[in-house]
Amino acid sequence: MNLKGKNIVVTGAASGIGAETARLLSAEGATVIGVDRNPPAPGLVARHIAADLGEPGSIAIAAREIGNGIDALCNIAGLPPTRGRVPVLRVNFLGLRELTEALIPQMNDGAAIVNLASLAGLGWPDAIPAIKSMLALRDFDTVEALCDTHGIDDARSYFFSKEVLIAWTLQQRWTWRERGIRMNCVSPGPVDTPILGDFLQTLGARAEEDMRVMDRPGRPTDIAPLVAFLCSDDSRWLRGTNIACDGGMHSHVLANLYGLS
Ligand code: NAI
């Protein structure tokens, strides 16, 4: 995995998985531009851009500040379900798509985009009508009405944000193919970061059951190497896919679903 000399944008670089990804990419020789509403730890990134990734105006300013010559974009910033359905959908999907599309013209040919989805997005094939509505929605201010139409409450909004993200990634499999730009998702199970407590609070008994069958929660150091690999040219044949990185939880859910347990 050779990342030397690559210019890589990492959103969510101030905490958890984003911070560890920024650290690893820098250690592998990349120049990391962090984008977060909070400042990252001193020295973690080559350049920090403060932005609110739930606000289109702030995203446009950040995209201009980032500039040209981008080799990879890691979309890692995200909000947990305790923050409410409108902020969750604005940051976890609408803002992520807005930043990505703004940066495409500023990317080098062959660039890689990596989206942090989740095991929570596994059920996307069961939500196609709502997903299609969300994919068609461009006005950030109308997301609450969409939630009302499709019965998406605060607790469901996190799952839905990740379902849409996985579906959008799959849909864009060949959108930028003539430039060699490709996009993939990574889907962790529960990871021990500051937002793990929020998930446990929202998911209640289900989360407790997940934690019981897992030998341990994930750590940011379990996730960052996969994100880094997806930024590297060694992963060039991976396009539009979603990779579970969860100690076997995705397989556990599928095995139970299909009677293979
Ligand atoms: P975290 O809370 O440690 O880090 C999230 C980062 O995103 C923070 O630095 C925060 O400032 C930034 N952020 C949030 N809203 C923002 C906004 N509006 N504008 C700019 N920056 C903003 O969370 P963690 O666990 O590292 O999560 C990273 C990603 O991984 C998220 O997308 C999350 O949904 C996903 N994920 C996390 C799991 C977990 O159990 N921790 C499991 C599966 C996926």
Image: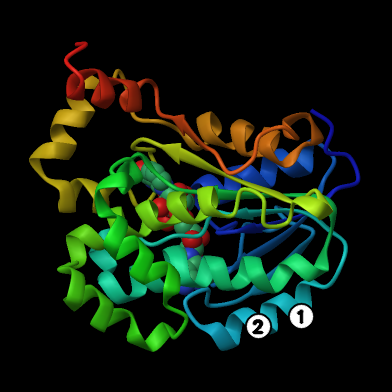
Please tell me whether mark 2 sits on a helix, a strand or a loop: helix
What type is the residue that disc 2 sits on?
Answer: Ala
Residue appearing at x 11%, y 45% in the figure:
204
Residue appearing at x 68%, y 74% in the figure:
102
Residue lying at the far top of the rendered structure: 261
Residue 157 drawn above or below residue 147: above
> Mark 1 and 2 residues: CB-CB less than 8 Å, in contact?
yes
* Label 2, ligand 1: CB separation under 8 Å: no
The residue labelled by disc 1 is: 64
Residue 235 drawn above or below residue 154: above
* Label 1, ligand 1: CB separation under 8 Å: no
Placement of the N terminus among the 4 image quadrants: top right
What type is the residue that disc 1 sits on?
Answer: Arg
Q: Which mark is residue 246?
A: none
Of 119 and 22, nearer the camera is 119
Q: Is residue 80 visible?
A: no
Residue lying at the far left of the rendered structure: 205
Q: Is residue 202 visible?
A: yes
Q: CA distance from mark 1 to mark 2?
A: 6 Å
Residue appearing at x 19%, y 25% in the figure:
257
Residue 257 drawn above or below residue 150: above
Report crowding for label 1: few under 14, some 14 to 19, many 20 or more residues within 10 A (C-alpha): few
Q: Quadrant of residue 129?
A: bottom left
Please tell me whether mark 1 sits on a helix, a strand or a loop: helix
In the rendered structure, the answer to whether residue 256 lies left or right of residue 173 reads left
Residue appearing at x 77%, y 44% in the figure:
26
Q: Position of residue 56 (x, y in %)?
A: 54, 83
The residue labelled by disc 2 is: 60
Classify the position of ligand 1 by quadrant: top left, top right, bottom left or bottom right: bottom left
